Image (tube, rainbow, N blue to C red):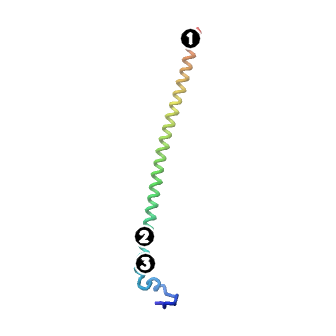
Amino acid sequence: MAKRGDLSMSFSEFIAMGYHGFYVWTSYGVSAVLFIALYLGVKSQNKSMKQQLKRRYSREELSQAKEAQAQAKEAQAKQQAERDDTVHADSMAQGENL
């Protein structure tokens, strides 16, 4: 074991840490395992959240597309009805002129 004022120590002395090495390295190991588990859990939740948001936006886009399509059909039907009314009014006017 190194003397008190001596800063040089062997690797095995560093690992042993004055007979406290088992507890110190065990706590480092447990901490590392917990940090890795926390990282993987957050990464998994992030992936899951991205998938949920992607599905939600896809549904919203599909809903908006269907709504726009329905509005376009409605506008087209309205224009056709206006044309039919105009043609009908013109034919009525021509019939009265005869």
Residue labelled with disc 2: 33
Q: Is residue 80 above or below residue 90?
A: below
Q: Position of residue 93 (x, y in %)?
A: 57, 13
Q: Position of residue 17 (x, y in %)?
A: 44, 84
Q: Is residue 46 above or below residue 60?
A: below
Q: Are marks 3 and 2 in contact (CB under 8 Å)?
A: no
Q: CA distance from mark 3 to mark 2?
A: 12 Å
At 50% from the left edge and 40% from the top edge, which residue is drawn? 64
Give the residue at the far bottom of this rendering. Answer: 3
Q: CA distance from mark 1 to mark 3?
A: 104 Å
Nearest the camera: 18 or 81?
A: 18
At 45% from the left edge and 51% from the top edge, which residue is drawn? 52
Q: Secondary structure at mark 2?
A: helix
Give the residue at the far top of this rendering. Answer: 98
Q: Is residue 71 above or below residue 57?
A: above
Residue labelled with disc 3: 25
Q: Amino acid at mark 2?
A: Val
Q: Secondary structure at mark 1?
A: helix
Name the quadrant containing residue 33: bottom left
Q: Amino acid at mark 3?
A: Trp
At 48% from the left edge and 44% from the top edge, which residue is drawn? 60
Q: Position of residue 47 (x, y in %)?
A: 46, 57
Task: Indicate which disc residue 39 carries.
Answer: none
- Mark 1 or mark 2, which has the lower sequence index? 2
Residue labelled with disc 1: 95
- Mark 3 or mark 2, which has the lower sequence index? 3
Q: CA distance from mark 1 to mark 2?
A: 92 Å
Q: Amino acid at mark 1?
A: Gly
